[in-house]
Amino acid sequence: MNAKTSGQRAQPPVLDTTVNDFVVKFANVNGSGSASANNMFAKAIFRMGIPVAPRNIFPSNIQGAPTWFEVRVNDQGYLGRRGGLVELMVSVNPQSMAQDLAEVCTGGYFFYDNSYPLDFKLMRDDIHFIGLPLTDITNSHFNDPRRRQLFKNIIYVGALAYLIGIEFGALQSIVEDTFARKPKLIPPNIEALQTGFDEAKKAFDNPLPLQLRRSNKNEGKVLLEGNAACGLGAVYAGATVCAWYPITPSTSVAEGYEKYVRQLRPQSSDGKDRFAIIQAEDELSAIGMVIGANWNGARAFTATSGPGVSLMNEFLGLAYYAEVPTVLIDVQRTGPSTGMPTRTQQSDITISAYASHGDTKHILLFPATPKECFDLTVDAFDIADRMQTPVIMLTDLELGMNEHMSDELSWDDQREYDLGKVLSAQDLDQIDRYGRYLDVDGDGITYRTIAGRHPSKGAYFNRGTSRDEYAVYSERGDVYQRNMERLQIKWRTAPRYLPQPVITTRSDLAKIGIIHFGTSMDACHEAIDQLASEGLIANDLRIKAFPFHDTVREFILGHEQVFIVEQNRDAQMKGLIVNELEVDPKRLQSVLHYNGDPISAHFVHDAISSSIASSDDDLLQQG
Amino acid sequence: MSYFRPPLRHPNEPKNEVGLTAQAYEGPISTLCAGCGHDSISAAIVQTMWGLSIPPHRIAKLSGIGCSSKSPSYFLAQSHGFNSVHGRMPSVMTGANISNNDLHYIGISGDGDTASIGMGQFAHVVRRNLNMMYVVENNGCYGLTKGQDSATADEGSKSKKGRINPFEAIDLVALALDLGATFVARSFSGDKDQLVPLMKAAMSHKGFALIDVVSPCVTFNNHPGSTKSYDYTRQHVEAGAVVDFVPMEQEITLDQIQGSTRKVDLHNGDSVQLSKLAAEYDPTDRNVAMRTLMEHKAEDKLLTGLIYIDPEAEDFHKMLNLTDTPLNELGKSELCPGSDALQSVNQALR
């Protein structure tokens, strides 16, 4: 690569030509319109059939602070965060330049706006500086200040199209789709792309050795955010009430629900809405509304993040004890307290599992992909209705707020909603005396009734106080204990209705087992493949639900050394496993990543391989 | 524990339009203290619902926590009830109400439940104009925890232990007026003649109806020096716009005409008649209501009756543009977009 603009400095090493396997990172200023340009970049790669994983790393701020967009391209389909230094940095933010420079690998490329001189103190000899006067180019093409800001972003995408080989047609199709309803915006966007492309071609003799080439890996895939998939799942599950309170990173769940329910739900003949979206005054109220609506027979849900779960604790205890179906989607962020609101973590496991005072425990679901966000949201409503208890879905910022390549969504039109044990008026007519908390079937799940459906039977006073099988208030110790024991029977019934863990057995002889869940999946799978290439075979189990199935315990007992990979400091999942499955904690080794960034394959690989190297040579040899 | 009332009743007990005697609206015998104002309110609710001929199973009764919030177990045994958590009844009520707009909703709360822990939710349920009757059984103290002052205890009121309350009281009626409530009333548990018509009007009002009922706590707040005792309330109460509730198409009797000065029509054809005591009072004017309230307060009088009503305001259901079929009756065919729609979603995500 020979940049016509490069200075008289020592030539840095040149990377081998790499096709469809590198990381590009954009350093932007937030609020400058860079997000749509960056998304266009990622989507164009997706449309070229190349597996791509874009990630936003953004501040808790609206305008002016540094923000990054990291795009991993990988033809083998590894879509977790790779880790390590990046091959190409697109620097559009002088504020973070020193930090951004440090993140480029030796021989890598630092693309910057050379309308202004670069600070010599920041120079590195081992990387390539490729400057293009983005500001000057933009200003000569566009007059309006706002347009200048926006189109500067599109222009660098055009320049990258030349430098790394994005098909211009792919970019063009995205512009056309994006502005299908505002066709006036199509020509200036195409012009900006073309300008960037042409200027880059003029400035640089050759494209970079980092190249994109059309592939065919994206058949049956979509590019989708987890939060939107959750919202869409709630539409398909027949949720009619969404009560919520704005909080990053969960807000786009409610927004996704609203978008899709308006767009897709069959219209009512009176032209009015078959859904209610209520922005509550706080999280307490949001979950209260959800409980009230579900108690009264509608499907209702809320979405929040850690601070909201803290606030909802009291109500979750009520829903557990009064046995009201409740669906809560917790998009986890970095805690404790306000923590880092725009960074990811898996640190609400303990609080969600045991939310509220007294002996309480709650069903948890752990999706790992947008498709699972959709599927498990639908399941969550069935499970909540079936089990008459809260179901908390634990997703996280990484999954919720980034577009992920995912298997396309599917729906079986034969699928019916499982409303669980609800008595109709006809059912009640057959019953002598209705008992709300009478365990007729021995599975701990009792029959509920909905207000207004029978003139003289089925009414009960729902409450958080102790009561007998007929919902009559009681402070008798034996009555209280009988009820608590029945709730325990119900808890043991739960796994029957919960998704099984996903076990991948690479070798029956493998002594190493790796347990992970949620967004650690991609990084773990890549790390496991990497370990295998080094002669270390490991099986893995991905947890999808709590309470755990017996297979989790069996997996642990079936391996000599078991790692649990999680994204929190306190090994919360390990704690849950030790507590609930009574396995010896010495058998379990934690791999913990909790700095707020998504966990990377390098991190998992290095943690496991160094741990094994220092602990037991046997394991290595056995492979 | 609760008792059940003896099933034997007078055979000629009158029946309402749906063929039920008042007994069908009762609950088990109360376990509240003998003479508790709350029991009188429960009795007024029974009389109201029977009088309006609402089938009991078409009513839902919700409450928070406290003596007041226990009371829904002592009336309307044939109605579903939900005794929720402290101060949070409004949110649970909102969810229930949105789920099925066809039922009639009674919210029972107390002064602790509403004016302290529940202040936030109270304010917001008022703003939403949720279609419900919200009864505050207001005794100025925390009964279940043995008589601590609540936020509605008047400044200068003396507790049972002789301590003078130094804090300004929260007046829920003034607060509700300020928050935009569309039906605001105050009454006294000892005045069933006023309370029952107010409740009938509240139930017929399409929107949020607050009735702040001074309901003395016989055990902890009924002594000399208390401003929420039976004696004090009787001495200071002033009936303002006392109403008589007139159901739709009922012939207005001579007595009602002579006694009343103004008629306010409700959305469903019912109406309320204001008594002659309120000859000059216009309860549809929020400014008048606020001013009258303040004037009475300055004179140390407790203004009761229908203080404000806006019968035309849109309720929450309408604000949300919700379909007429209750949401809890919609099934898969009305809710689920199906696989073809999902295919087009997939297409747009490529």
Image: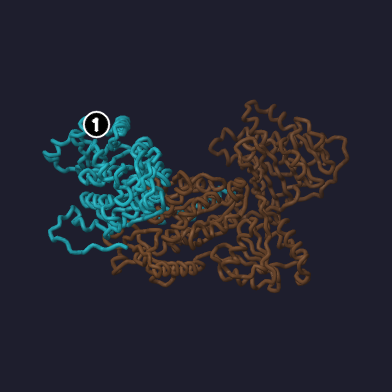
Chain colours: A brown, B cyan
Q: In the depicted view, which residue is nearer to us: A182 or A604? A: A604
State the image coordinates of residue A244 (x, y, percent, origin top left).
48, 47
Left or right: residue A312 versus residue A346 is left
Left or right: residue A381 versus residue A342 is left
Residue visible at 82% across and 34% down in the picture = A120
Q: Is residue B28 above or below residue A6?
A: below
Disc 1 secondary structure class: loop
Quadrant position of residue B238: top left
Outermost front residue = B162
Q: How many marks?
A: 1
Q: In the depicted view, which residue is nearer to us: A179 or A315? A: A315
State the image coordinates of residue B275 (x, y, percent, origin top left).
19, 36
Q: Mark 1 — residue?
A: B281
Which chain letter goes with mark 1? B
Residue visible at 36% across and 42% down in the picture = B152
Quadrant position of residue A453: bottom left
Amino acid marked by disc 1: Tyr
Q: Is residue A475 above or below residue B63?
A: below
Left or right: residue B75 versus residue A11 is left
Quadrant position of residue A620: bottom right
Q: In the depicted view, which residue is nearer to us: A491 or B120? A: B120
